């Protein structure tokens, strides 16, 4: 395998990402509860089945991979970071299950399969999401060491996923949607960026911070990764908005065009398609520049920031 200190081509980046994804997939399958046919068991079979269905049904695994890459870039090991990486994916999947519910975005397709509430039912989907959220913090508490690193990861993940992070961003997004549909308010680009720095960006910045905490990185490296995560998180959302406009539903595994149909504020709505692409490129280059303190160890993360501009799913 190519070392972190050697220049990487797109193919070696792809190979590394595939390897990290396989590590995450194997760990997720091991960490998730298995259905128990015995009704007297403490874990209801239907709940465990719904949790595994939602988590193991595919996905880019970007958040856990970022955590592993950040730990390695700071001189740590992926093995030490794998419980936190999986915790991130559990929180992300919980958010998707709840986001797909009829009361939220009302989606019936996720990762090319029926959403959790369609495959099971709404109550089971809600509880599966609750189970994943709480299991995430259990994984960190049991699997991350030393205790100071585990505590730091709990704080980072709680802040990123809570009312000042993802959940708050989701609420603000719903309110913006209602304003657009009911009051015909256009909003502003600044409001949109504030929403997405919380809704999407916070949970893309957190993996970098958690990986750095696990590797017990220096302050300069932690700050570099935080700035990288902030820029990459927003760039990722812009590309997501573009894919909703011009993406391939088969590759995406979900409906396209639904954001404009729901009256959502999106980057193409404010900046147009080309303006959105320009903004995404600007953010990707900001992310690359932020990694300067990491020198050669940041090469894979630099390549990843640029590769995200070309994603089609």
Image (cartoon, rainbow, N blue to C red):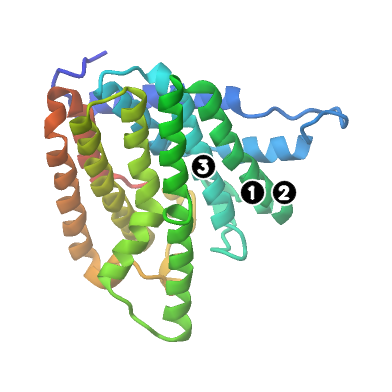
Picture quadrant where residue 128 is located: top right
Q: Secondary structure at mark 2?
A: helix
Q: Residue 147: x percent and y percent?
A: 46, 23
Q: Residue 121: x percent and y percent?
A: 72, 53
Marks 3 and 2, the one that precedes in the sequence: 3
Picture quadrant where residue 225 is located: top left
Q: Secondary structure at mark 1?
A: helix
The disc at residue 91 is: 3
Q: Which residue is mark 1?
A: 116
Foreground residue, 188 or 272?
A: 188
Up the image or down, 144 lies above or below 187; here it is: above
Residue 238 visible in the picture: yes
The disc at residue 65 is: none
Q: Label 3, label 1: how many angstroms apart (C-alpha)?
A: 15 Å
Q: Residue 106: x percent and y percent?
A: 58, 63
Q: Residue 264: x percent and y percent?
A: 41, 70
Q: Secondary structure at mark 3?
A: helix
């Amino acid at each position: 395998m190519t070392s972190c200190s050697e220049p990487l081509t797109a193919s070696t980046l792809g190979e590394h990402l595939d390897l990290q994804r396989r590590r995450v997939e194997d760990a997720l399958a091991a960490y998730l509860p298995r259905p128990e046919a015995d009704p007297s068991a403490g874990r209801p079979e239907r709940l465990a089945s719904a949790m595994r269905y939602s988590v193991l049904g595919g996905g880019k695994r970007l958040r856990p991979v970022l955590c592993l890459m950040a730990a390695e870039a700071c001189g740590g090991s992926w093995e030490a970071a794998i419980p936190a990486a999986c915790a991130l994916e559990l929180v992300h999947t919980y958010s998707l299950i709840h986001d797909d519910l009829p009361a939220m975005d009302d989606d019936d397709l996720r990762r090319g399969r029926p959403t959790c509430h369609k495959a099971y039912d709404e109550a089971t989907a809600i509880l599966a999401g609750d189970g994943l959220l709480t299991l995430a913090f259990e994984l960190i508490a049991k699997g991350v060491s030393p205790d100071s690193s585990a505590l730091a990861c709990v704080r980072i993940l709680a802040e990123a996923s809570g009312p000042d992070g993802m959940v708050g961003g989701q609420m603000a997004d719903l309110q913006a949607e209602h304003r657009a549909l009911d009051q015909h308010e256009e909003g502003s680009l600044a409001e949109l960026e504030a929403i997405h720095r919380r809704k999407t960006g916070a949970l893309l910045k957190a993996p970098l911070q958690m990986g750095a905490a696990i590797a017990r990185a220096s302050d300069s490296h932690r700050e570099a990764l935080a700035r990288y995560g902030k820029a990459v998180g927003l760039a990722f959302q812009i590309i997501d908005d573009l894919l909703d406009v011009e993406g391939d539903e088969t590759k995406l595994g979900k409906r396209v065009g639904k954001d404009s149909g729901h009256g959502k504020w999106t980057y193409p709505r404010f900046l147009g398609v080309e303006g959105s692409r320009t903004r995404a490129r600007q953010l990707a280059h900001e992310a690359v520049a932020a990694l300067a303190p990491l020198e050669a160890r940041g090469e894979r993360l630099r390549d990843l920031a640029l590769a995200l501009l070309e994603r089609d799913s």
